[in-house]
Amino acid sequence: MTRGALLKAVGGAAISSALLTAEAYAQSSGTLSPVQSTLQQLVSALTGQIATSLAVLAVIACGFSAWAGRLTWGLAGSIIFGIVLVFGASQIVSFFQSAVGTGG
């Protein structure tokens, strides 16, 4: 799966879940709990066991590339930076929220 196809799939899933929760939001007498639970499930799916397995496979691919002498530092840095962003996203957001004094 290419990066563009993956982004389209994730974007489509996010849009469809937002549209599907609109009816639940309208029926929930003004609370945001259906939207919050849907978004939390999406975050859990994107940072759970599947993402962990994909990250391990990416690191293994880097290892095989290095073993074959074909690893570029740009590729290795991109993979590591991507892993840091995916799994550190909640800590990064919490840091910025505390820096500006909002959220919790």
Image (spheres, rainbow, N blue to C red):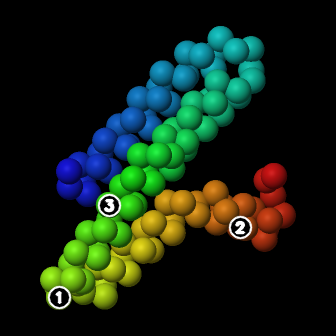
The three-letter code of the residue at mark 1 reads Gly
Q: Nearer the viewer, mark 2 or mark 3?
A: 3
Q: Position of residue 3 (x, y in %)?
A: 26, 57
Q: Residue at x 70, y 26 (%)?
A: 33
Tell me which residue sits at (31%, 68%) in the image. Answer: 60
Mark on residue 57?
3
Q: Which badge, 1 or 2, is on the more N-terminal residue?
A: 1
Q: Which residue in the structure is indicated by mark 2?
A: 96
State the residue in front, 24 or 50: 50
C-beta proximity under 8 Å, tags 1 and 2: no
Q: Percent x, y for residue 35?
A: 62, 29
From the viewer's perspective, is 81 left or right of 102? Answer: left
| 60 lies above or below 26 | below
Q: Residue furthest top?
A: 27
Residue 92 left/right relative to 17:
right
The numbered mark, 2 or 3, whose residue comes first in the sequence reads 3
Q: Verify CB contact (< 8 Å) between mark 1 and mark 3.
A: no
Query: Element type at marker 1?
Result: loop
Res. 69 mark:
1
